[in-house]
Image (spheres, helix red, strand yellow):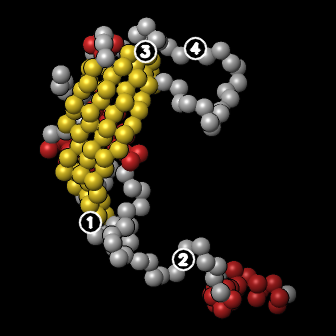
């Protein structure tokens, strides 16, 4: 089942094997794969990464519904203090794969925010469930991890400068010299 792949964590399964029948796969990353994924996402550490996938062929074998449960123990850097922030992820996810090309019938592309995502095209050489799990992990990571008790006590980047700062900047601006030259004429 394990085949060397181009990704840090690759578990490629042949299309005919996943189309055959409903099945459950348990996939777990090895320590060196966890380290490579941690490096990819600039994590302090990825102690474990695993998923249980329920594969359910649909539509006479043209679609594959994948329901999964991802588990990971992650350490990220706090965005304020750079302290390590450990998190346990235990989240469900769902993906849909198509084994037939999606037909494009419209000249225009209409986007409906409320519509379901179209199915992912299955690679004819097999579906890489390892990479799919890594992509799900990327979505589930906290984009702004904060250590407990960390607070931002500096100026907000959204605050407008006060009047004194504006006047001081105007005095030291390189264009203030040009303004003085213009008045002297």
Residue 131: x %, y % from top left: 31, 33
Question: What mark, if any, has residue 156 been given in the picture?
Answer: 2
Secondary structure under badge 1? Answer: strand
Within 10 Å of the Cα at label 1, are there few (<14), some (14-19), or many (20+) other Cα atoms? Answer: some
Mark 2 or mark 3: which is in front? 3
Does label 4 or label 2 sit earlier along the sequence? 4
Residue bearing mark 1: 84
Mark 4 or mark 3: which is in front? 3
Give the total of numbered labels: 4
* Distance between the alpha carbons at the discs numbered 4 and 1: 47 Å
Does label 4 or label 3 sit earlier along the sequence? 3
Q: Residue at x 42, y 56 (%)?
A: 143
Residue 70: x %, y % from top left: 30, 40
| Extreme residue in the left direction | 31
Dividing the picture into quarters, in which one does residue 52 lie?
Answer: top left
Residue bearing mark 4: 103
Asked if marks 4 and 3 touch (Cβ < 8 Å), the reply is no
Front residue of this view, candidates 36 and 70: 70
């Amino acid at each position: 089942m394990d085949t060397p792949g181009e990704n840090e964590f690759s578990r490629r399964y042949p299309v005919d094997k996943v189309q055959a029948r409903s099945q459950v796969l348990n996939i777990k990353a090895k320590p060196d794969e966890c380290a490579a994924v941690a490096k990819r996402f600039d994590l302090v550490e990825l102690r474990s990464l695993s998923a249980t996938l329920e594969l359910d062929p649909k539509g006479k074998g043209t679609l594959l519904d994948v329901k999964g449960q991802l588990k990971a123990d992650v350490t990220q850097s706090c965005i304020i203090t750079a302290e390590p922030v450990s998190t346990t992820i235990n989240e469900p996810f769902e993906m849909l794969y198509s084994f037939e090309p999606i037909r494009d019938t419209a000249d225009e592309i209409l986007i409906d925010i409320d519509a379901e995502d179209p199915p992912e095209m299955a690679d004819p050489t097999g579906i890489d469930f390892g990479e799919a799990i890594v992509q799900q992990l990327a979505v589930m990571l906290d984009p702004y991890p904060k250590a407990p008790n960390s607070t931002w006590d500096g100026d907000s980047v959204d605050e407008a400068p006060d009047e004194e700062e504006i006047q001081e900047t105007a005095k030291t601006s390189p264009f203030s010299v040009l303004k003085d030259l213009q008045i002297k004429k």
